[in-house]
Image (spheres, rainbow, N blue to C red):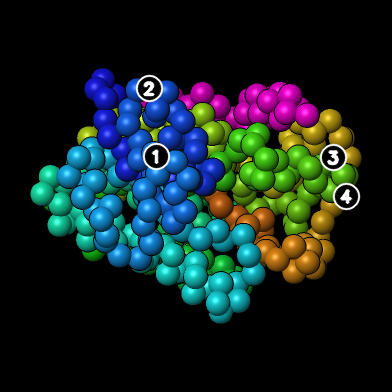
Amino acid sequence: MNKFLHFLLPGGSGQAGTMLSSALRSAGHRVTILSRHPRSSEEVAWDGVQPGPWADLLNETDVVINLAGRSVNCRYHPEQRREILESRILSTRAIGEAIRAARRPPSLWLQSSTATIYAHTLGPAHGEDGVLGGDEPGVPETWKFSVEVAKAWEAAAQEHQRPETRLVLLRTSFILSPHRGGAFDVFMRLARKGLGGTQGTGRQFVSWIHEADFVRSVQWIIDKPEISGPVNLAAPFPLPNRDFMKDIRGAARHPFGVPAPRWVLELGAVALGTETELILKSRRVVPAKLLKSGFLFRYPHLAQAMEELAQRWWAQG
C-alpha cells in the first residue's frame, strides 16, 4: 500500500481486528472500528443490525473489513445458533446496505468468512474451488449447521455487492498467535498439563495461519485488484492433528500428552461449553489464490511458526 487509506472495521475489537488495526495504524493508515461498546475516540457505536449514523463514514472510507460475528466457541443450542447466525447475517447486510447507499462507496470490501465452509475430508486439500460442506454422509448435524452459517454469511455479502466495490470473502483458518485466550494459548496450556496428546483419531487435518501471515495476506489482497471472491487464508501445509499436537508438545516443552479419544472430547466439550467440531472436523485447506498471485508465506510450515510463537508465549510469563 503506497498511500494512506481509511479503514473501517466493523467488529474490529476482537483478536483478528486487533492484529489488523495495530498493523494498519503502524503503517500510517487511519482505522475506525465499529463496536457495540466503543471505548475510545477511534471506535464508533453501531448495533450490528442496521445502518445508522456510522454509515456516513463510508463516504470517506477506502476499505471495509467486516469481522463482526458472535463467537462459535459455545454449545450449539437453539438460542446460541440463532445468535451465531443473526450476528453474521444482520451485520453483513447492514454493511452491504450502507455501501450500496453511499455517495462514494469504498473500493474494497473484505468480508470475514471461515475455512469450515469446506467439506470434511481426509483426501485432497480444498483450494477456493474445493467442495463445500453440508452434504457429507455421516457427519454430525452440528457440523452441517456451521457450513450452513458460512454459506449464508457469504451469500449476504454477495447479495449486497456493489459493482464499484471489489468483494473478497476471507475464508480464514485457525489464526495462531501467542496472545492469551487464542487457539495457540489454549493448546499450549493443555500441553503443559499433560493434555496435549492426539485428539480423536489424529487423522483429521488442521488448517492454520501464523498471525504475521494473516496480516500480511490481508495487506497483499488490498494491493492486488485482480483478487476477488473467496480467498483461503491458511498456510500452504495443513497437517494431521497427531502431528499438530506433537509440535504443540514440543513448543510447550512437555514431551508426553495423554491421548483424548472422541468420547473424552465430547464430555470435555460439554463441560467447557463448546463443540468438538472445532477439533474433530478435518479442515484440509490450501491458499491457492494467494500462492498463484505470488504471495510468499513467512511461516509456511508449522514447525517454523511454533518456534517463533513459543518464544513469545514463554516471554509473556
Q: Answer with mark 4 or mark 1, whichever residue precedes in sequence.
A: 1
Is residue 137 shown to the viewer in this render? no
Contact check, label 1 and label 3, Cβ < 8 Å: no
Secondary structure category for the residue under label 4: loop
Q: Answer with mark 1 or mark 3, whichever residue precedes in sequence.
A: 1
Q: Residue furthest left?
A: 103
Q: Amino acid at mark 2?
A: Ala
Label placed on residue 258: 4
Secondary structure category for the residue under label 1: loop
Circle 1 residue: 41
Distance Cα–Cα, label 3 vs label 4: 11 Å
Magenta-drawn segment: 294-317
Distance Cα–Cα, label 2 vs label 4: 44 Å
Circle nearer the viewer, 2 or 1: 1
Distance Cα–Cα, label 2 vs label 3: 37 Å
Is 180 in the magenta? Answer: no
Circle nearer the viewer, 2 or 4: 2
Contact check, label 2 and label 3, Cβ < 8 Å: no
Label placed on residue 27: 2
Residue at the location (62% across, 60% down)? Answer: 73
Circle nearer the viewer, 1 or 3: 1
Rendering quarter of residue 53: bottom left
Q: Amino acid at mark 1?
A: Ser
Secondary structure category for the residue under label 3: helix
Secondary structure category for the residue under label 2: loop
Q: Is residue 119 above or below residue 129?
A: below
Residue 231 is left or right of residue 254, and the answer is: left
Circle nearer the viewer, 4 or 1: 1
Distance Cα–Cα, label 2 vs label 1: 19 Å
Circle 3 residue: 192
